[in-house]
Image: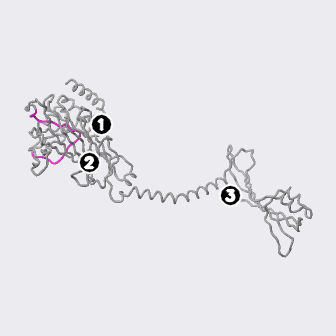
Amino acid sequence: MSSRRFGSSRALLAALAFLATPAAASGQVFISTQPKPEFLVGPLSIRANVAPRSGPVEVGVLFSLVVPAGAKTDTVQHDLYLLWPGEVDGEPAAGAPDPEVRRAVESRGFQVVREGRLPLAARPIFSGRARAKPEPLPGGAPYVTYTREAGPLGQGSPGSWIRIPWTPRLIDRSWLVELRMQLAGLRRPKQATWLENSLWGERHVITLSFNDVRTRATFPMYLAYRDRVVHLADDPSQLVVNFSDSEHLKIDQVYPGSSQRRPSESRRATEIVSTYLDPSEGLRPQVLSIQFGYFTGWKAWAPVLFATLFFGLGNLAGPLVTTLVKTVGARLQGRIQLGPSSAAPSRRETGTIIPREALAKIAPGETTHAQVLELCGPDPEERERLSAPGRRTLVYRGRRVVPHRRRRFAWLATVNRWDVESHEVEIELQGDRVLDVQAQVNRTRLTQPGPA
């Protein structure tokens, strides 16, 4: 008993630490009518059924009670309460609202926003031809949904207080009691940009939890009845989410990582994600969170289509970008120069330009062919005339582009214009001797130097 009290104290401190944080999950706590209940809850199965269409999610809570050996049966025969964070709704059961349930929350200073009865039934565990049919429990489960008074931060999320009437099926090991309800806030859209929603479809997050009492509406009720909390038995208990139409389902993330994914054995095109509840965790919240989305139509092919589109655009954009870079680079190179102000303008020369000093050394009738190649260069253009045997002409051509700077900022200078000089030298030979030399220089001005 002392270890249980110590575990409850630790859980209470943890709950106080997280009281200011709004809970994003839906969970529940079973509370007995009498303090220090001798029985336990088990097995427990909380099942949410998710469909592609948006709207409230159907949730079923299936459980039974475990009575330890030696305990008296009459100590168990009383009502059980379920504290559920959030607003509950569902198919209404026959019967008027229970005034005792309403007074229980109003006496704590809460405001009732909805009341009614939820469907409650007993379902047999064993199958076969002799399997009994589900038994609807008359009157269902009375409930109220309540909120606290609005404060500086707003109204806050509501809570629900549900009474589960005593029935012998609660302690019958061959039956489970099922409580069905509809939850509007269980399925929440994941925040994303309009482009992500357009291309990949909307993503949603669904979260189930057990022992989650961190909301402003549920924590005061838990604090008032914390000595009546019913703990989990060692029987297998789990949180389960059933996804219908699994052929169009995409699950992105699942927490915790130890959760199990498997196809349903009884439902067609249904995928099940589940996690076990550890009874040794005490009152620590245990959570199952899933990020998912449903895709239809062309969005099913979105990964392949966009990969193909980007591949095609990449092949098409490559040559365009290369051409653009070359064009812009050539224009910038023609308009901007880098270097100190004392440096001479950078010239561009192509071909062979023979200096005047070299031409002055060529003497007609004396300079030989070998001497011309030594002075002017070894690779001239050579022409011969068939009408004049023994005569040939050596031609040297070159081009020089000289920039004229206009403005300067540190090492950066802009170019105003370019002077282009086209040099052409013709050296006529008679045999092995120079017969005549002609040199011609044409000068023009350009705003862009053009390719080298």
First along the sequence among labels 3 and 1? 1
The alpha-carbon separation of the residues under discs 3 and 1 comes to 68 Å
10 Å crowding of disc 2: few (<14), some (14-19), many (20+)? many
Where residue 190 appears, as percent x and y from the top left, is 34, 46
First along the sequence among labels 2 and 3? 2
Residue topped by disc 1: 22
How was the colour assigned to the protein in this rendering?
Answer: one colour
10 Å crowding of disc 3: few (<14), some (14-19), many (20+)? some
Q: Is residue 354 above or below residue 116?
A: below
The alpha-carbon separation of the residues under discs 1 and 2 comes to 28 Å
Image quadrant occupied by the N terminus: top left
Q: Is residue 398 above or below residue 410?
A: below
Tell me, for residue 272, which label it has, or none. 2
The alpha-carbon separation of the residues under discs 2 and 3 comes to 70 Å
Is 439 positioned to the left or the right of 201 in the image?
right
Residue topped by disc 3: 448
Tell me which segment is drawn in magenta: 76-94
